[in-house]
Image (cartoon, rainbow, N blue to C red):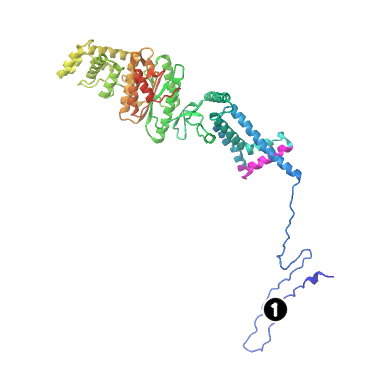
Amino acid sequence: MITPDDCGTTAAPVPTTVPVPTMPVTAIAQPPAPIAVSTVPGEQHSPGQFQNATLPNGWHAPNWHLHISSVGEVFATLGIALLGLAFVVVLAVGMNLFAGWRRWEARQVRNYGLGALVLPVAAMWVANSWFAPLVLWWQGSTVFARSGPGSGAMIAMITGCLPLAWAGAALYRARFLSRLGTEGIGSPWKTRRLQRRQQLGKAAAARRAAKYGAPLVTGWLKAKVVLGPLSERTDATQSTTITQMADRHGSKLELPIEGLGHMVVLGKSQKAGKTTALVRLGTGLYCAYWHRYVRTGEKRPLLIFVDCKGGKPGLQTGRQVVRIAARLGVTPSRIALWPITNRLDLWSMNVEDMCATLESMINPVQSSNLGEEHFKQNRVRVTKLAVTAPEGKPRSKQEFLDRLSVAYLKEAWKDHDSILNEIDALEQSKPPAVGDVSGKFRNIFAAIGEGFDGGRPLDSFDVIYATVPGTVRGDNARAQVAALTTLIAQFACGEHDRQIVLIIDEMSAVADKTGGINQFDIAERLLGMGVVAFFAAQNQFGLGQTPMNAAACWNRAPPAPC
């Protein structure tokens, strides 16, 4: 019988000392010291372990046993996976039905999907694992399959798969709307019915959103004016699935202020909301330009709102503008409700600007024949003689009216024979020019009151609301509007660092079949001065003296119906 001792021998112990050979003893040499050598332990035998000198000690044979799941386990895992995928599909279908009921665009569904990303991101952050959403979805599916929907497993599943469901709904919605706008859905009548439902739903959504209000400005730099909720957007090219998913347009009607130097015309009938839109547009532009002024120091905004209809509606709109300006933080001393609470300084202008303003007041309408042109030139000459007298320009309304007499003009220009002859010729016209000009100016100033006497210059205001009795006294209203527009144009031509926003509402109130303020000339003058101007009339014929000028102003200013 073979014993463990027959497999090998135990190594003999190594001696700890080495014998020293015998040498003859001499008187000089000394024997060397003994050298200590450590003992090498022999290999210990382990009867329970197979030992092989050619393999490393402690080597184990590999385990080739494979765990193969049973048929039941495989079908259970597959069922859980299918249940989880079915839950995602059902969730996506439900969201698509809800988006269709609300008539949402594809970008709106996409935005909800992007917002839902907060759930899986929070799960990854809390669990400190990149696969936390997938684990939640799988665990929720497992619990749902075993315990049913009342176990709270749906919350875990929604946390893991909600963005994926929103993404699927957005893709389907984008594809549906793309087909609806191009090839159609089914028959033509069905396509028209779906398109009308989509349009009506978007309009209803805009009306609901309008109840909650909207900010005046938006954008990173507050450089876009918000006119209100956006109901519908049209484009020359039909959006595709990809472009709808990548659409960056918002749900608000925005107007950028950069490059907004052109004229915009609002043409609609009564009760169409023109004044409301203009008030919001004006205050929004003021806010946007104010943010730019605070950020860059470029051009402090100056909002001038001229209401031509007058009466109680004009005063109500004016008080509304004043309240809005006060809520926006405008200094009360820089808010004007002309001519009720504040005045404009006409008599501090230079001689040329004063002459131009007074001439526009007495001749607000362009002449249409030679006879009207003759009387117009006579009035202009008398006004210029009174303003440019050798003793200096008038400093008040009363001083100017006192100069409109033959005795004063002859006394002031007594050293100029040619002008004295001119005054005599003016008096020989029918009616006499000096008396005619004096009477017209007295009527105009009586209607205006103290609006232009002893006030402040335009540069000292930030918001000006001017109301004129257009619907009550058309001639006086035309004179006031002409004076205001001339005053603004003269100020815009001068040296200033202001961004002027001019809004003229109800131009048709100062225009009739006999003539009116020619907005074509005003637009031409203000266009090159950096003035942002808006004109509102009930129709295009209220924009100019003649249909030809009105059409020219309409074509020059791109219409923006409200």
* Callout 1 amino acid: Thr
User: Viewer-proximal residue, 14 or 128?
Assistant: 128
User: Viewer-proximal residue, 368 or 382?
Assistant: 368
Whole-percent x, y for residue 522 in the image: 33, 23
Label count reads 1
- Asked if residue 134 is among those painted magenta in the image, a careful observer would answer yes
235 up-or-down from 542: above or below: below
The answer to whether residue 343 is visible is: no
Whole-percent x, y for residue 516 in the image: 34, 16
State the residue at coordinates (68%, 86%).
22
Whole-percent x, y for residue 184 in the image: 56, 28
State the residue at coordinates (47%, 33%).
219
Q: Mark 1 highlights which residue?
A: 17
Image-based side of 352 in relation to 194, left or right? left
Image-based side of 476 in relation to 238, left or right? left
399 up-or-down from 54: above or below: above
What residue span does the magenta drawing correspond to? 124-146
Quarter where residue 371 is shown: top left
